[in-house]
Image: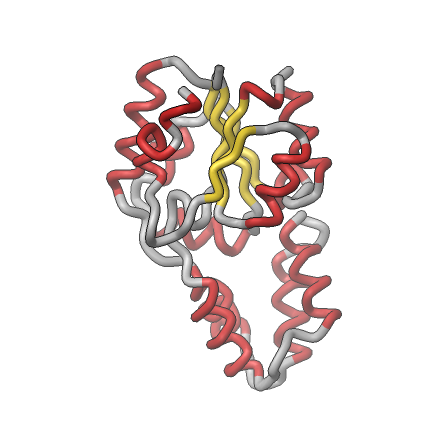
Amino acid sequence: MIDTLIFDFGNVFIDLDLEEGLKTTLKDLGVENLPPATVKINEAYEVGAISTDAFILHYTSTFKNLNRDAFIKLWNLILKTFPKHRLEFLQQLKATGKYKLILLSNTNTLHIHWIKQHVPFYNAFKACFDAFYLSHEIKLRKPNEAIFQFVLSTHHLKPETCLFVDDNSDNIATAKRLNIKTWHITPYKEDVADLFTVKALLF
């Protein structure tokens, strides 16, 4: 029986446009693919291993056509809308008291700053969760097994009683290996608010 729901953030609650974001980024940077050093910097920033200033400096010094403001705008380009009905679904879920609710997201400081500025109900959203884990704060990121083990051990959870909702196949694969139940949600085709319809057999 499911007693804990673990949710990703991007493409579960807030819509993202990863494809268009990458396409525009590569065009603006004038490259076909991100250099390996930049990929490593991105990952380091996502786990809070480098500061925002150092992160921005990497981009503005590597790609001379970028200034600080232009880069921040480009970096946040993937962030789209947060439909309010998903907040309402979460609030209703919390009100039942039936489940422990945990957010587990690969999220960096710049993205969270943008979300706080553009999502007026961010605090209400965060208040719905029993635990709110962002990769840059806990120094761990998906799909590494360590981040799932951290959540399981911190909250004394049994994997088979947890359901993990995420749009990324690698993250889902790691959860499955740990015997966590999963929903590999399809952005723009499926909606987290339909959880109890899509995964009815688990509840």
Up the image or down, 1 lies above or below 67; here it is above
| Residue 28: image location, x then y, percent | 51, 82
Up the image or down, 33 lies above or below 132; here it is below
Q: Is residue 72 left or right of residue 80?
A: right
- Residue at position x 51%, y 66% in the image: 75
Up the image or down, 72 lies above or below 170; here it is below
Q: In front here: 113 or 79? A: 79
| Residue 72: image location, x then y, percent | 50, 67
Which colour scheme appears in the figure?
A: secondary structure
- Residue at position x 43%, y 18% in the image: 99
| Residue 35: image location, x then y, percent | 70, 75
Q: Quadrant of the C terminus?
A: top left
Q: Quadrant of residue 120?
A: top left
- Residue at position x 26%, y 32% in the image: 88
| Residue 124: image location, x then y, percent | 34, 32
- Residue at position x 57%, y 47% in the image: 106
The mark tally for this picture is 0
Q: In front here: 125 or 203? A: 203
Q: In front here: 180 or 18? A: 180
Q: Is residue 16 left or right of residue 169?
A: left
